[in-house]
Image (spheres, grey):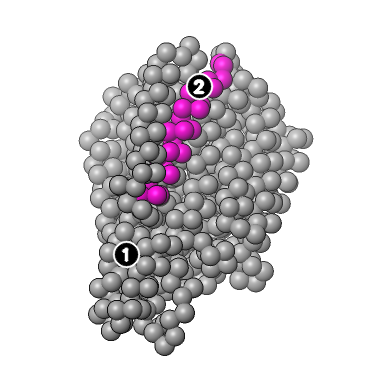
Amino acid sequence: MTTTSTSTALPAPPERRTATVVMACIGVFVAYLPITSVAVSLPAIGNALGASTAQLSWVQDAFVLPMAAFILTAGVFGDVHGRRKVYLTGLALSALGAVVALSAQSIQLVWAGQALAGTGAAALLPTTLALISHAVPDFRERGKFIGIWASSLMLALTVGPLIAGPVAEGMGWRWIYVLPIPFAVAAFAVALAVLPESRAPHTRRLDWTGQVTAAVAVTALVFGVIEAGVNGLADARVIVALVIAVVAGAAFVAVELRSDSPMLDLALFRSRAFTVTTLIAMISFLALIGFIFVLSMYFGMVQQLGTVEAGWRLALMNGASMVVGALAGKMMHRVQARVMIGGGLAMVAVAQFALLTIDADTTFVSIGWRLIVLGLGMGLVMAPMTATAVSAVPYRLAGMAAAGNNAFRQVGGALGPAVLGALLTAGAVDSLPGKLTAAGIGDEVRDSVVAAVDGEGLGAVAGLDLGADTPTVMNALGDAFLDGMHLCLIFSGILSAAAALLCVLSLRPGRDADH
């Protein structure tokens, strides 16, 4: 998931190793805490600030985009200038971003706070795994600690909505941003006292050209996908954004091939195991983060649940993933990676297809077992995917391999709300006129509702004065939403199943030996 290069082959003293691992786990917890705590509050944010579906997609993407764009650079900063410094900077940015979003009076300021927090997460993610690798140089023993690290990540995704729900309902949605601040401040104070400094043993330089081209490519791609869902592929802004993404992506490849100190050594992709696990990382997070976005909208708009009730449902999925993730780290040297990763992705696909039967009246228990199966599958994928990517390349490239794997994962995470949000809107908008007509809504009201959804997204209907037609229109909107959601689930299920098949066929024992 992130950099794992070491600065020495000597094992760290036991007390220092324990402190380092604990701080690394706290760091990744702080990094991921905003994802589900914000996701479960998206309906409340949209209602309070009058945000469209596309604008709500940017709430998630404003956080995930900097993670994808700056992870590799943050890893190099840590290697060159010291991981402790980058770790502390990440904590400070996470807290600062939370403060900005906490005081936001507009959706644009929420985006700004999310972007700062996402930049902090980009600093924390490569640093935390690099710190573990420095403290635990034996790659066999390291697998257990990577499992604990992955469980800390899933713990943040689990407790985020459980805490955010009561806070949002009792104090308002802005106060969910208080959650990361005490963790970040406490970790900062402790890290100053106990966290040792470390750097990479080899000389690296910052690759600014590679950083700029990568950031432009990722941002343009996500912007283009989000706008395509609102305005269609023929829109001029969409075409320009996608062209920029292709050009910047090609420039990044050209720059990295010629660089003496590349941000991402493209020789890594000569390893089949690295290439496959990196592709799976991107697909799995596209499905996971995108699904969390769509599911939170379903709970709020279709089932009319409060943030507490929605939080408990998300906690089922992430809690199951956290428990299995801890076990997966211990199983990695007894069970083949392709069995664990492929089996986990197959479970995710089964759960996604099983969710096609849910509707507005689906009970907690009925949706709960599906979410648990999905969470169990994701838990089997996380730690083995990272460990396989790292162990598949020469030891000197292990840090860059982990950083690259995590960068592509966050690209998938950024694309998730964009792609699934676009599919959700497209499916719902296509279905809505028929649902309204079937419900007996007159042409004038139907046209005004469809125009509002076309212009501002699904949440715009709540602001219309529909009089006695309001309950009927909202029911029709919920049915149209379900059609869009089913389209998202079919897309995600096919992706997960394809990734599982790719894993089983490509990750053969002995293809890429440890170095």
Q: Position of residue 308 (x, y in %)?
A: 55, 69
Q: Relative to 222, is 128 on the left or the right? A: right
Can residue 443 be spotted in the picture?
yes
Name the residue rendered at 28%, 59% in the picture. 487
Can residue 298 be spotted in the picture?
no
Check disc 2 and report its element: helix, strand or loop: helix
Name the residue rendered at 50%, 27% in the picture. 212
Which residue, given by chain and number where applicable, does mark 1 sit on?
A: 429
Task: State how far apart marks 1 and 2 are (Cα).
Answer: 41 Å
Q: Relative to 193, is 482 on the left or the right? A: left
Q: Counting other residues with Cα less than 10 Å from the Cα at mark 1, is it few (<14), some (14-19), or many (20 or more)?
A: many
Figure check: 44 above or below 20: below
Q: Main secondary structure of the magenta part?
A: helix
Question: Is 49 one of the magenta-colored residues?
Answer: no
Q: Provide the residue span drawn in magenta.
A: 204-229
Check disc 1 and report its element: helix, strand or loop: helix
Q: Name the kind of residue labelled 1 in the image.
A: Val
Q: Nearer the viewer, residue 161 or 332?
A: 161
Residue at the far bottom: name it: 468
Question: Is 205 one of the magenta-colored residues?
Answer: yes
Q: Nearer the viewer, residue 448 or 216?
A: 448
Which residue, given by chain and number where applicable, does mark 2 sit on?
A: 209
